[in-house]
Amino acid sequence: MFGLGMPEILLILAIALMVIGPKKLPDLAKSLGRALGEFKRAAQEFKNSIDLDSTVKEFNEPVKNIKDIKADIKKFSDPLNNDSVDIKESTQIKETPQSQETLYNQETVKKEEETENKTIDEKKILLDKNDHLQASNVHK
């Protein structure tokens, strides 16, 4: 506790007992405990509000992207729109690090499944060979 050992804590309590008195010391300890509990609750509420704000920001970014996509669709679907826009540039999918990571994870899972399927096929072949050898040993 803050680098204080047992002797230091006992000394502080003894001095507090002499200065405050034995009648008021329990009340002081109770009010100090309540104040610390209130401080912890306030700190936890503050932390929760910060977490909530960051979560809201994470969900607002995709909404902005969807709104941009809707605006592009409206722009291209409007027959009276005479703006010359490079269609290839506006329809390109913008890759984010998150989408690249998702693609990498999907490829990794697919490779693992393929490896697992090959291993299963190899085990089946070995079992078939073993059965064949056992059958030929029975005939001898």
Image: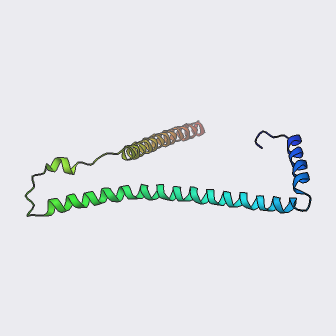
Res 61 → quadrant: bottom left
Question: Is residue 47 shown left or right of residue 73?
Answer: right
Judging depth in this view, the residue of 20 and 93 nearest the camera is 20
Point out the image quarter for the C terminus. Answer: top right
Residue at 88% x, 53% y is 19
Q: Tally the marks.
A: 0
Q: Give the colour scheme shown.
A: rainbow
Q: Position of residue 76 (x, y in %)?
A: 15, 59
Residue at 67% x, 57% y is 40
Judging depth in this view, the residue of 52 and 27 nearest the camera is 27
In the displayed structure, 41 sits above or below 109; it is below
Residue at 57% x, 55% y is 47
Point out the image quarter for the N terminus. Answer: top right
Residue at 52% x, 56% y is 51
Question: Is residue 131 shown left or right of residue 105?
Answer: right
The residue sitting at the front extreme is 19
In the displayed structure, 115 sits above or below 17; it is above
Q: Position of residue 131 (x, y in %)?
A: 55, 41
In the displayed structure, 30 sits above or below 113; it is below
Q: Position of residue 20 (x, y in %)?
A: 87, 56
Question: Is residue 87 shown left or right of residue 44?
Answer: left
Q: Position of residue 90 (x, y in %)?
A: 20, 50
